[in-house]
Amino acid sequence: MTTRSARPLAAALAALLVLAAVPGAGAGPQVPPGPPTPPPAAPPAVPAAAAATPLEAAPVPAAPAPSAPSAFRVVIDPGHGATEDGAIGPSGLKEKDLALDMARRLAALLKADGFEVVLTREGDDGPTLDQRAEIANVQRADVFISLHANASRSSKARGAETYFLSRDATDDAARTIAAIENDAAGVNGDASAGAAGGEGDAAIPLILWDMAQTIYLEQSSRLAEIVQRELNGALGITDRGVRQAPFRVLVGATMPAVLVELGFLTNPDEEKRLADGEYRRKLSEALAAALRQYRAKVGVRGAAAGAPR
């Protein structure tokens, strides 16, 4: 039943539907698309070593750890040795044996407490008096302590004594003790004699060694007072005081130096105590306590008055 006039209308409608389905159809002339826009160029590669941003600081090498402070160094001198017996008690206890045992005991206590310790003799050998002080100098010790036992014409004399160096003895008794110790080493009681006991160039002029120890006079005196106080307190013994005398073993020591007479071997009762292990333990602990106190007061003096170790 379709008429001829309806066919052209239907064809027109179909054409309109086709145009509507095509994008941009009927929107006027179409501009052909241009070539595709190339993607932006990639930035040049940055070497890995330069990858840090400008705000980043260059790595700083770690500073070396500060070196540990030098330990406080003590040179312990066990008096006598070899052919030098020193004082001998009524029952036969020898000063050289007592001094060596006490030095070993004291060294063990000090090492456990962080000290560096050197002994002038490890066995029954006998360095000269000059060599003992020289060992302390070579070792650049902070303290030199010489251990001895006393003797007296009186069998009742008792107690410990602590000495520091002086060409003028405190009294006749101190002068006698120094002469006995010096004579035992063959220097004829003269602390200013040379190493070979000679004269002239071989002798050590008194003024030189006196000046050498004068530098440490105050420190030696302070150390001697601390040692004597600790010995008196720990042992409950009579205070014989701090004394000065020309002990040759202290001559030339370039550091605070003291000589300790631990007791009188010529007193039978005191000899028994000095032979007792428990009494020796108390003696060594008192000496160690004194050196700890001295270290706390003065600190590490350093090698040979400031020279680097």
Image (cartoon, rainbow, N blue to C red):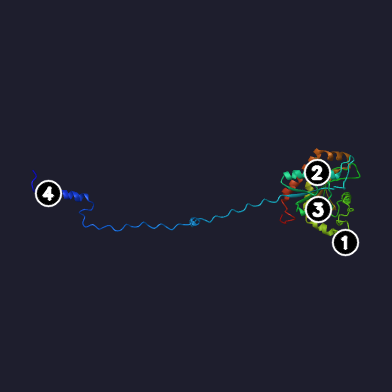
Q: Nearer the viewer, mark 2 or mark 4?
A: 4
Picture quarter with the N terminus: top left
- Disc with the residue nearer the chain's start (3 vs 2): 2
Q: Which residue is mark 2?
A: 102
Disc 2 on helix, strand or loop? Answer: helix
Instruction: Measure how far apart labels 1 and 2 are at the Cα level.
Output: 38 Å
User: In the image, is residue 83 above or below residue 34?
Assistant: above
Please state which amino acid type lies under the numbered disc 2. Answer: Met
| Crowd around label 1: few <14 · some 14–19 · many ≥20 (10 Å) | few
Disc 3 on helix, strand or loop? Answer: helix
Q: In the rendering, at what x and y percent does residue 214 appear?
A: 80, 56
Q: Which mark is residue 9?
A: 4
Please state which amino acid type lies under the numbered disc 3. Answer: Ala
Disc 4 on helix, strand or loop? Answer: helix
Residue name at image x 75 percent, y 43 percent: 109
- Disc with the residue nearer the chain's start (4 vs 3): 4
Whether the residues at callouts 3 and 1 have beta carbons within 8 Å, the answer is no
- Disc with the residue nearer the chain's start (4 vs 1): 4
- Disc with the residue nearer the chain's start (1 vs 2): 2
Instruction: Measure how far apart labels 3 and 2 are at the Cα level.
Output: 19 Å
- Disc with the residue nearer the chain's start (2 vs 4): 4
Q: In the rendering, at what x and y percent does residue 245 appear?
A: 85, 52
Q: 12 or 140, which lies in front?
A: 12
Residue 198: image quadrant is: bottom right
Q: 280 or 20, which lies in front?
A: 20
Q: Which residue is mark 1?
A: 200
Please state which amino acid type lies under the numbered disc 4. Answer: Leu
Picture quarter with the C terminus: bottom right
